[in-house]
Image: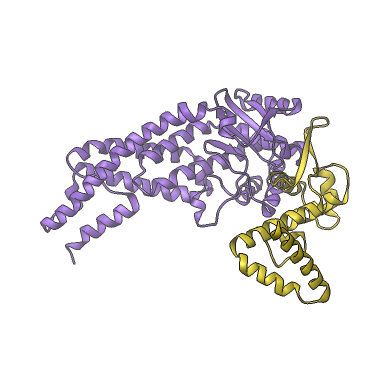
């Protein structure tokens, strides 16, 4: 589900999913559900059950990986499977891919119009156009 | 205007109760339909909880099923009671179409009920867990969970079910039948996000389904629904039975763990998680720990009461 009005990760994820994922990218080690809950609670009060459910969803979406730890009662430790940049890339790839497949002409025309506003944008566009021309020659 | 009254009556009866049995061979089938209806009544009556204001739906269904059984008996005795003075050949033909359709539906219902009973008893319940839940992995349950289940089963006076750890991060638990008998599955998510007392209360809820013999009752409820499938009201019986047993399992669980507080707190925490995300899919023939519930009006078709209703019922019991 996409929420085009949001200007951050919430564009492609639920509110809490985005917060949890941000916390996950902030640390470089695996965290248990309880550790996550403590981290997320700093910005927004949330129950452990909620965090557990959200992490499970992120896992089923393939965004996080997890490991089952048996010691001290069974629990998972979660870590990010993809970086923030990779995630954004996947979102853009999916959205733009769908637009280009469905409305090829309109999408390209729109992009050219919107991107040709400033000199810097025009430079970027001509760079990509050159790339396209080179590819056409091959 | 008068000659239309019996027809209108028949249509109204058909809409509410399904096509009605009439004459000839159909009359032979009336006893079978009556037996099925009476089974439904006995089932409903045996759910004592419903009379403590637990389920208004069930009471309504009871009343309407009673009317239906009376109607079946009356029609079985003599259809002319409904329209003592048939006015025209046209109306007579109109009725006979109803009767033929109904005869077919009644036969189909009995056959389907037999098939459903066979499938539920020997097919579905003999399926291994991995086929019932292909998307999940089942692991060995930790010893402390096994110990709790053993203790609860002993307290409830039932045979201890097999305990499995469900490889899922979402907090949930369920009890179901498989080829190896009853299996109680509890998710890693439940164990890691609830306090030990709350986990115990959830396990007690599942054990209570065994203690209250809910699987047998549900089998009867389902067979009744299938047998009476041509009567729209029958679709309310089965879910009502399920919902009542769910409340009863909560009450039994509270007794097993010495008070409703732990269960109320566990259900509240799970409800909180539900506000953010959707519940995992519950399989047919499985007693699941919780259910997200549909809108208020479609609730009569839900097999599980909402968490709000369950929490409220437990709190009412406590006061």
Residue nearest the viewer, comparing A84 with B29: A84
At 72% from the left and 41% from the top, the residue drawn is B169
At 36% from the left and 43% from the top, the residue drawn is B229
Q: Is residue A59 above or below residue B6?
A: above
At 77% from the left and 41% from the top, the residue drawn is A65
Q: Is residue B122 above or below residue B6?
A: above
Q: Position of residue A120 (x, y in %)?
A: 83, 72
Q: Is residue B243 visible?
A: yes
Q: Position of residue B211 (x, y in %)?
A: 57, 30
Q: Position of residue B146 (x, y in %)?
A: 71, 26
Whether residue B61 sits left or right of residue B194 in the image: it is left
Q: Is residue B20 above or below residue B209?
A: below
Q: Quadrant of the N terminus of chain B?
A: bottom left
Residue nearest the viewer, comparing B57 with A80: A80
| Colour used to depict chain A in the structure image | yellow
Q: Position of residue B15 (x, y in %)?
A: 33, 54
Color encoding of the figure: by chain
Residue nearest the viewer, comparing A90 with B81: A90
Q: Is residue B195 visible?
A: no
| Colour used to depict chain B in the structure image | purple
Whether residue B304 sits left or right of residue B165 in the image: it is left
């Amino acid at each position: 589900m996409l929420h085009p009005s949001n200007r951050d990760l919430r564009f492609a994820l639920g509110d809490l999913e985005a917060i949890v994922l941000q916390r996950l990218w902030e640390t470089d080690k695996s965290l248990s559900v309880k550790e996550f809950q403590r981290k997320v609670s700093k910005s927004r009060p949330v129950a452990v059950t909620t965090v557990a459910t959200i992490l499970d969803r992120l896992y089923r979406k393939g965004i996080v990986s997890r490991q089952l730890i048996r010691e001290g009662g069974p629990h998972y430790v979660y870590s990010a499977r993809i970086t923030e940049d990779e995630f954004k890339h996947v979102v853009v790839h999916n959205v733009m891919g769908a637009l280009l497949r469905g409305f090829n002409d309109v999408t390209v025309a729109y992009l050219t119009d919107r991107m040709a506003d400033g000199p810097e944008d025009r430079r970027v566009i001509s760079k990509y156009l050159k790339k396209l021309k080179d590819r056409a020659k091959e | 205007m008068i000659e239309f009254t019996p027809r209108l009556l028949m249509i109204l009866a058909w809409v509410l109760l399904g096509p009605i049995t009439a004459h000839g061979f159909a009359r032979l089938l009336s006893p079978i339909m009556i037996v099925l209806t009476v089974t439904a009544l006995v089932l409903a009556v045996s759910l004592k909880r419903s009379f403590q204001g637990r389920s208004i739906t069930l009471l309504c269904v009871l009343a309407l099923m009673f009317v239906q059984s009376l109607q079946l008996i009356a029609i079985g005795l003599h259809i002319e009671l409904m329209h003592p003075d048939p006015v025209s050949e046209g109306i007579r033909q109109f009725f006979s179409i109803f009767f033929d359709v109904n005869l077919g539906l009644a036969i189909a219902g009995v056959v389907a009920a037999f098939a459903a009973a066979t499938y539920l008893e020997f097919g579905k319940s003999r399926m291994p867990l991995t086929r019932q839940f292909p998307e999940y992995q089942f692991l060995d349950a930790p010893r402390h969970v096994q110990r709790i289940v053993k203790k609860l089963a002993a307290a409830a006076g039932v045979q201890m079910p097999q305990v499995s750890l469900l490889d899922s991060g979402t907090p949930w638990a369920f009890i179901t039948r498989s080829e190896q008998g009853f299996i109680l599955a509890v998710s890693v998510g439940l164990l890691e996000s609830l306090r030990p007392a709350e986990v115990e209360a959830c396990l007690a809820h599942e054990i209570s389904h065994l203690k209250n013999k809910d699987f047998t009752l549900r089998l009867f409820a389902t067979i009744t629904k299938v047998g009476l499938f041509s009567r729209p009201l029958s679709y309310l019986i089965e879910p009502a039975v399920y919902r009542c047993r769910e409340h009863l399992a909560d009450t039994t669980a509270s007794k097993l763990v010495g008070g409703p507080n732990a269960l109320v707190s566990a259900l509240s925490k799970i409800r909180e998680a539900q506000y953010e995300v959707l519940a995992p899919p519950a399989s047919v023939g499985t007693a699941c720990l919780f259910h997200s519930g549909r809108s208020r009006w479609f609730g009569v078709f839900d097999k599980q009461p909402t968490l709000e209703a369950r929490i409220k019922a437990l709190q009412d019991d406590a006061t």
